[in-house]
Image (cartoon, rainbow, N blue to C red):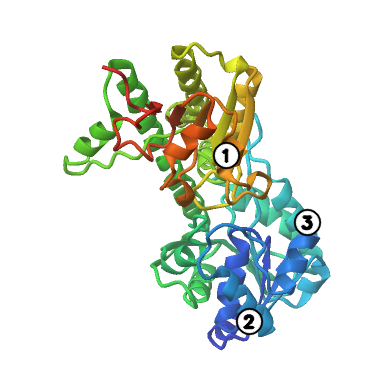
Amino acid sequence: MSLASLKSKIKDQDARLAVIGLGYVGLPVACSFAEKGFDVLGVDILEERIKKINQGISPIEGKEPGLAELIEKVVGGKLLRASSDYADLADRDIILISVETPVDDDNKPRYRALESVLRNLGPVLKEGALVIIESTIAPGTMKGLVAPILEETSGKSLNANFYLGNCPERVMPGRLLRNLREMSRVVGGMSSETADVMTDLYAQFVEGDLDPTDSTTAELVKTAENAYRDVQIAFANEVALISEAVGGDVWKVRELVNKSPGRNMLLPGAGVGGHCIPKDGLLLAYGAEGTDVPIRLIPAAREINEYMPIHVAEMLENALGKLGKKLSESRVLILGYSYLENSDDTRDTPSEKLVTDIEARGAQVVVHDPYVLEYQGDLMSMAQGCDAAVLMVKHDEYLNLDFNQLAQQLRTDIFVDARGLFASQLEIPGFSFEVIGRGKH
């Protein structure tokens, strides 16, 4: 099949689509195309997830406006089905791949999932099919890894027997469908003709700008935009640490800094989590491996942001010490375990690092999170007998926290706000109250 034929099939919505990886990105992408009338097959390795989807049930917890209803609609309308069998992909004209691309402890990409998908897809790849990588990948990965594996395993030639491109996602949990629809996309093709066809495809549901370019530029754009966020958050966190040290208030500092034209100081906090920001800068830096480019800023930002949960542990230890208590003899309530408010996504969550650290210091830990199944429960019951509470996630449930009731449950009335949720309050009556980024005069 030629690109011209594929372009025509997209226009007529006759192209058969597949999405491999039905997580936070792949599932809403599959649903979005299915809603527009495309026949969509979803492929995943988790049988429980497949079962739920085929029953029209969302496997994603947390507040995800419209997703559960859309899954029920497109599955019920027989426009989306899920499978674990790669043989089912043999008739697909377009395959989108959305799997995790983490980094190892040595900050190098770990493409096990991506490589596995490519090696399973190659033998069943349809003649003339278009493969699109939506996962975030280091610059050079399309040319150096994806294309060679597909050519090897399929026995087909790129731009002759199949086509290839990458269109990195731009979504956040809690706004998946909205982000997919409204955010602009960088459409990277391994040829300009491929990028043109990909643009037609995404125009089926994307209302934001679609910017066709080459694959390397697309790789650079996605990794650079998240590296930018990591660096900017690290700056805010370092200003918070300095503010504490000199008796300042980073929240007031940030407000006044941002009154200056062209300034947009981000929010400081207990650390950076999620699948994207903590590792995408490292993917960007990895793209320069083997060259003489000195990489300094990105690793420094990572070091600062990785330190922040440890700093929260130090804040907690100091707060307990002021009241004559040792962390090693204390029971601590952690409010929030996901990495993002109103989400069940716990990937690379700063709360895990905090829990690990204070348990290593001898503390007992109780974790509450209304969206993470393992930590759900009655908050006040879980607070009973604890010596301190540490707010790590700005879930809506904590916005109207009843501090009078909380004080009745805690043995020692210590509250550490590691997200600045209550930064507008100078104190909480009856509590020893600590806010990240606020020092003592």
Give whichever of discs 3 and 2 has the lower sequence position: 2
Point 47% across, 39% down: residue: 405
The amino acid type of the residue labelled 3 equals Arg
The amino acid type of the residue labelled 1 equals Thr
Can residue 303 be seen here? The reply is yes
Instruction: Provide the secondary structure element on which disc 1 rests.
Output: loop
Above-or-below relation of 264 to 290: below
Q: Position of residue 189 (x, y in %)?
A: 53, 63
Q: Nearer the viewer, mark 1 or mark 2?
A: 1
Q: Quadrant of residue 179?
A: bottom left
Q: CA distance from mark 1 to mark 3?
A: 31 Å
Give whichever of discs 1 and 3 has the lower sequence position: 3
Q: Which mark is residue 119?
A: 3
Q: Nearer the viewer, residue 395 or 152?
A: 395
Q: Looking at the figure, which quarter contains the C terminus?
A: top left
Q: Position of residue 82 (x, y in %)?
A: 74, 71
Identify the residue position indicated by label 1 in the image.
Answer: 349
Identify the residue position indicated by label 2 in the image.
Answer: 15
Q: Position of residue 421 (x, y in %)?
A: 38, 40
Q: CA distance from mark 1 to mark 2?
A: 39 Å
Point 61% across, 38% down: residue: 382
